[in-house]
Image (spheres, helix red, strand yellow):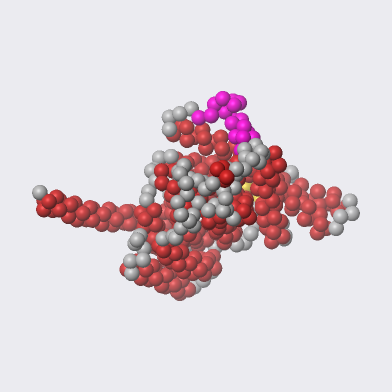
Amino acid sequence: MFWADPINTIYKSWMTGLTSLGLSGSLAQVLLYLLGIILIISGAMVLDIMLVWVERKVVARFQGRLGPNRVGPFGLFQPFPDIIKLIIKEDTTPKGADKFVFNLAPILSLASVIFLWAIIPLAHNIYGVDLNVALLYLVAAGALGTLSVIMAGWSSNNKYALLGAFRQVAAMISFEVPMIVALLIPVIFTGSLSMNTISSFQADNYWLVLVSPLGALLFLIAAIAELGRSPFDLNEGESEIVSGYHIEYSGMKFGLFYAGELLHAFTFGGFVSILFFGGWDGPFAEQFPILGVFYFLIKAMIGYWVIMWIKYTVPRIRIDHMLMFNWKFLTPVAFALLIVTAVVHPLLIGLNNWVYVASMFLINVILGWVIVEFLRSKSKKERAAAETVSVSAAHSHS
Amino acid sequence: MQNSWLYIGLFLLVGLAIPILPIAFSALIAPKKPNPIKQSTYECGIETVGESLVQFNAQYYIFALVFLIFDVETVFLFPWAASINALDYFVVVEGVIFILILIAGLTYVWRKGMLEWI
């Protein structure tokens, strides 16, 4: 009984326990909510600490190094000395900085990621809250992250920080358009904005990546840009603007930006898995929700690993190329996919399940193939034109 | 859980409070020895030249304007997408026409050369 529904069992037994102590029902409810919230957030924070180790170990392997391997087995305890170092480091504030905003920015940066954990369904009955507008909440919390970046850049009183913040905000708001459109794809299939309904729909029917692989890809690309990770890490291009918007931060405030970035990447890996790869879905996840939590964390870690893989493989691109890529490629493709999905889905939904899935998959693949072929022929023509121009220019010079 | 907005409200409060803890702890035990050199603005090791709050490229502003149009209007698409299975096919086509108007706006901006970096 307990293993089938651990949260509700504990909630009910503690609720009766607290009310029998003489607390009013609503006060007991608030207390239990607070307990659950602190449990979720501290879980996320512990995960965050371990992500420091994961990130450093994985980047080392990608670059043919060993990574941290001195403190504890496999360097597992490396994050703790890191944190102690960050805490006992002097925290400098540059002169001319807007103190209040300067101090608020790192807090908001980490908080905007923590907020996202309220809506994540860890299993079908283990979740913070089943919000019926969870996807809008996701977009809103993302906007809060953008706000923290512009606050940090503006209040630092530093040119690099300001430039980094402008770039990051331009990228974040631009890539939010294809991200919202990609978010509409699961909504069309499941008819709900709730994360819980979307993942239980996938557990009952099929993973949405099967009916919309292109949508999953678009969401992943937009999420990477939203995170400000390479190849879209113009906010902290070391060779140009040194470290971007958090250049003036030191000590624990810098640590919060770093922690926020790592947890953000992991959380978006989790959202890719919830929206397109079934979330907690897996064998026996319905009977034993703890297994569902395990499956979800594994899938989120795979999503995080893919994001890291891209980060450490692809070089940074230029800011104008990045915005062109968004407005002239990603946004039109996302809208095309949305139109095709919206038009075709109601026509095919009456069909046999497997025929439906296969045809939606084929439509996605064909759409992606047509777009890539069109771009390839267009860029070939452009390149040929550019080459003839440069060749004739070279001739006229000689 | 019946009262989801109470939960969200509490979550926002605790979520804001948790990141304050390490900063407060660090402020208690970290050394504080400010001096003018340490607090000067970083600029690749040389003295800061001119104002730090430089004028920014107007291009960022244009992108923000274009984003605003899309962001406001895509929010209208969420209810349409959520109820697409319950609606007549005619309403689906109406939604598609709405998206086409959005794309017409994007094409207009594109043709006007506002998406080119200057």
Question: Which residue is nearer to you in this view: A119 or A340?
Answer: A119
Quick check: A253 left or right of B103? right
Quick check: A227 left or right of A126? left
Residue under the point 47% across and 32% down: A60
Question: Which residue is nearer to you in this view: A227 or B59?
Answer: B59
Residue under the point 55% across and 43% down: B37
Residue under the point 56% across and 35% down: A53
Magenta span contains residue A279: no
Residue B26 location, x and y as percent? 67, 41
* Quadrant in which residue A320 is drawn: bottom left
Assign the C terminus of chain B to one quadrant of the image: bottom left
* Quadrant in which residue B113 is drawn: bottom left
Residue under the point 86% across and 55% down: A23
Residue A264 location, x and y as percent? 55, 48
Residue A140 location, x and y as percent? 57, 60
Residue A93 can be seen, yes or no? yes
Residue A88 location, x and y as percent? 65, 37
Assign the N terminus of chain B to one quadrant of the image: bottom right
Q: Is residue A19 above or below residue A313?
A: below
The magenta-colored residue range is A67-86
Question: Which residue is nearer to you in this view: B69 or B90?
Answer: B69
- Say how many tags the image has: 0
Question: Which residue is nearer to you in this view: B80 or B74?
Answer: B74
* Quadrant in which residue A46 is drawn: top right
Quick check: A168 left or right of B31? left
Residue A43 can be seen, yes or no? no
